[in-house]
Image (spheres, grey):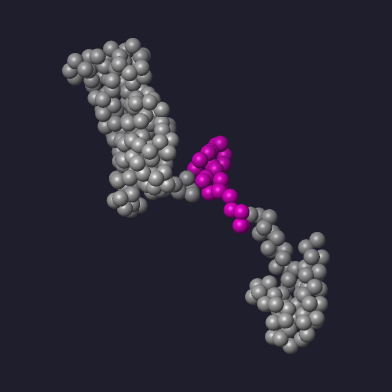
Amino acid sequence: MANRVVISGLNTSTLPKLKNDEVLSLLKQVRQGDDFARDKFVVANLRLVLSVVQRFSSQPDKADDIFQVGCVGLLKAIDNFDETLNVKFSTYAVPMIIGEIRRFLRDNNSVRVSRSVRDIAYKAMKAKEEFTRANNAEPSVEQIANMIELPTSEVIFALDAISDAVSLSEPVYNDGNETVRVMDQISDEKNCDEQIMEKLSLSDAIKNLDDKEKEILLMRYYVGKTQMEVSQEVGISQAQVSRLEKNALKSIKTFLE
């Protein structure tokens, strides 16, 4: 979506750019009920909507819908913006647009979330928007939890539950030759290359043991039996079990070295 020129039938390369004094002038006309000024102001800020839409590039199939919902957020921002605040309109509008898009994505999420969890998430998002408007900064999760009088853990759970799922195949970087995907950045400490090679080497080392040594190692280290229990089962003395076990471990160590 970052390179799209036409979205929802609109050629974004033709959109005008306004200076800050022009923004304030148009807003005054909008407040006076000038519909032409309102339309002009909306069109001039569609670039702002597009910049927000690009943050949701993981939903390329919903690009047009997200853009239109973002425009709804823009209209709400225009209606609620207070010119007496010492902030730019764009600073005020972006959280409004993001909030509107996130609500749309939550309501159209394919993953079913319980009503109670969804309600907590809605309260948290609303509190976040109110805090952002009042303080010109985003609140921490702890601050949100305090505002809606709920434990931080419940707020985190609710917000995570409504967040968009990310495909492991989603690209995160492309240098023109090779694409790096999410799965390429996820480590697996249980199955790293080094451990896989160690397992393969160990398997080869065990294959070199005789049947009796393999049987003893199996019962000792996989089944978890004591040397006495192994001796009773295979019909040899504990001393013999101990000797065969030591010889087997020594052979494996030598093979691996």
Vertical placement of residue 153 versus 6, above or below: below
Residue plotted at (19% across, 15% down): 32
Q: Is residue 45 visible?
A: yes
Q: How many marks?
A: 0
Task: Tell me where the magenta segment starts and ends, as one range.
Answer: 171-191
Vertical placement of residue 235 versus 14, above or below: below
Q: Is residue 8 visible?
A: no
Q: Quadrant of the N terminus?
A: top left
Q: Position of residue 184 (x, y in %)?
A: 56, 47
| Residue 242 located within the stretch drawn in magenta | no
On the picture, is 255 further left or further right than 153? right
Q: Quadrant of residue 37?
A: top left
Out of 53 and 4, give the one closest to the viewer. Answer: 53
Q: Quadrant of residue 23?
A: top left
Residue plotted at (59% across, 53% down): 188
Q: Position of residue 9 (x, y in %)?
A: 29, 32
Residue plotted at (71% across, 86% down): 232
On the picture, is 188 further left or further right than 221? left
Q: Quadrant of residue 147?
A: top left
Q: Position of residue 89 (x, y in %)?
A: 33, 21
Out of 99 and 11, give the one closest to the viewer. Answer: 99
Q: Position of residue 178 (x, y in %)?
A: 56, 41
On the picture, is 201 further left or further right than 120? right
Q: Quadrant of the C terminus?
A: bottom right
Vertical placement of residue 191 versus 164, above or below: below
Residue plotted at (41% across, 33% down): 139
| Residue 173 located within the stretch drawn in magenta | yes
